[in-house]
Image (cartoon, rainbow, N blue to C red):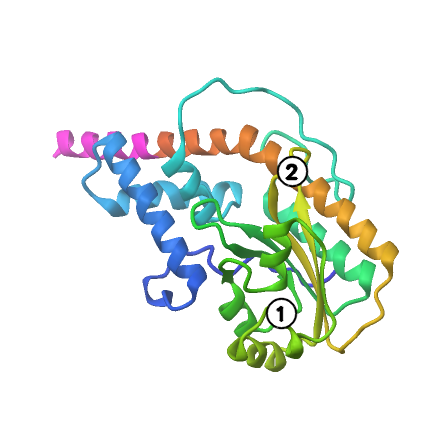
Amino acid sequence: MADVHIGDEQTFNESALVAPINLISHVAVRNAVARLQEDHGITDADKAFRALLTVSRRYDVKLRHLSAAVAGAEAGTRRVTSAPPLSFSLRGRGRAPKRSDVFADLVTAAVELFSAPAAAVQLRDAVFGGVCIESHTGLAERFRHHFGYVEDEGSAAAYATAHCEVVRVDDVAASPLYNFTDMEVLAQSGVRAEVAIPMCDEDGRNWGAVTVMFDTRRPRIDPFAVEMLHGHADSCAQWLRWYDSEVMPTLVDAVHEVAAALVAETGSAAVSA
């Protein structure tokens, strides 16, 4: 199996707010912390953050994604349904499967289908709308820093997500999708060409894209591989729809439970003192 990485902003670091992905993560976490402070009467922001971090680590879900769910959570009736089958992985089952496992399997399937050196799963951010790298393999650090979050249609993945269509770039150095700085980063990262496959669920919602990257210009791309990966990507989109509606409310509840426990713990300590 390829050496797959699940993003680069799982831990929250105030000194790392240079990359756009860290900027939007910072905003998402602050919004969630404010919501927890309001809901539980928490005066110490660090305590609210600790509740987020505890659940993030327990269920292996990114702080950014968990925070967005906490900040935007609304009460309502929940359905109880089983996870839809994934065409590329058996790890999406159970009551609280790990998104990171599913993304890692999708990245591995992508590089194997195309015999490519690098690939990434990039999802639309729930708050800001651009696409974020969620999982990757073979990507240089500077690439991850520069393209960790891309707004509008500023990359093959962002364009594929916005239009729900396959985007093939045979030579990134000649593509109108990229500006001069983008091209410089791509060149230094060894990316010469790419193909981005959209991830669309059964209702037509665009969740993001799976991008396969090549170290040569105008690579030979098997149409069958594109068709196979497109099926995998749509399968993942349907699973993500289920995950957000069925699993995320449970994780949000867990955050509130931890926050309430921390408040109770502080109250007990105050009484004992």
How many residues crowd around disc 2 within 10 Å: few (fewer than 14), some, or many (20 or more)? few
Image coordinates of residue 90 in percent, x first then y, are 74, 40
- Residue denoted by label 2: 204
Compared to 23, does 193 lie above or below? below
**Amino acid under disc 2:** Gly
Residue beneath the point at 56% across and 19% down: 79
The residue mark sitting in front, 2 or 1, is 2
Image coordinates of residue 138 in percent, x first then y, are 66, 69
Q: Is residue 220 left or right of residue 141?
A: right
Residue beneath the point at 60% across and 29% down: 95
How many residues crowd around disc 1 within 10 Å: few (fewer than 14), some, or many (20 or more)? some
Compared to 26, does 238 lie above or below? above
Q: Quadrant of the C terminus?
A: top left
Alpha carbon separation for disc pair 2 and 1: 29 Å
User: Does any portion of residue 169 appear in the rendered image?
Assistant: yes
User: Is 208 inside the magenta-drawn segment?
Assistant: no
Tell whether label 1 touches label 2 (CB within 8 Å): no
User: Is 271 inside the magenta-drawn segment?
Assistant: yes
Q: Residue furthest top?
A: 77
Q: Nearer the viewer, residue 16 or 214?
A: 214
**Amino acid under disc 1:** Leu
Q: What SS does tag 2 mark?
A: loop
- Residue denoted by label 1: 139
Tell me which corner region of the image, top left, top right, bottom left or bottom right, holds residue 187. Answer: bottom right
Compared to 194, does 242 lie above or below? above
Principal secondary structure, stretch drawn in magenta: helix
